[in-house]
Image (cartoon, grey):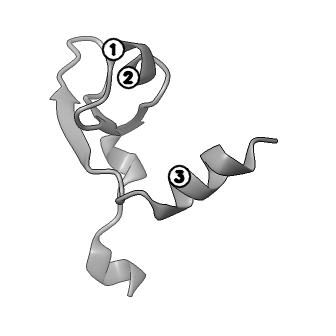
Amino acid sequence: MNTNADSHHAESEPTTLDSVTIENDDAPDECAIFPRGVSDDILTTTWITAQADSFVSLESMR
């Protein structure tokens, strides 16, 4: 365990996320969420996708 890397990560700014809608012809559309401004190497392994029915309104969760 590298505590220097861990402490640096804890002190860094929050990650800004970006998103894009992927329109699929033969499947439900998806939303891809990924960190903004990272290298391609990091981007290829740091993302998530979800279909529309995976989302709920913010108000319903409050």
Q: Position of residue 4 (x, y in %)?
A: 66, 48
Q: Position of residue 29 (x, y in %)?
A: 25, 29
Name the side, left or right, on which 46 lies relative to 10. left
The earlier-in-sequence mark between 2 and 3 is 3
Along the viewing direction, whichever of 7 and 58 lies nearer the viewer: 7
The disc placed on residue 9 is 3
Q: Which residue is mark 1?
A: 40
Q: Residue at x 29, y 75 (%)?
A: 58
Residue 57 in percent (x, y) is at: 28, 70
Q: Are marks 2 and 3 in contact (CB under 8 Å)?
A: no
Horizontal side of 57 relative to 12 (left or right) equals left
- Looking at the image, which residue is at 46% across and 30% down? 46
Question: Which image quarter: residue 41?
Answer: top left
Q: In terms of image quadrants, where is residue 21?
A: top left
Q: Residue at x 33, y 36 (%)?
A: 34
Query: Label 3 neighbourhood size at 10 Å, few (<14), some (14-19), many (20+)?
Result: few
Q: At x 38% / y 88%, what residue is drawn?
A: 62
Cα separation, mark 3 vs mark 1, equals 19 Å
Q: Amino acid at mark 2?
A: Leu
Which image quadrant: the N terminus? Answer: top right
Residue 44 as seen in the image, left or right of residue 57: right
Element assignment for label 2: helix
Q: Is residue 4 above or below residue 13?
A: above
What whole-number distance in Å separates the C-alpha atoms at marks 1 and 2? Answer: 5 Å
Amino acid type assigned to the residue bearing label 1 in the image? Asp
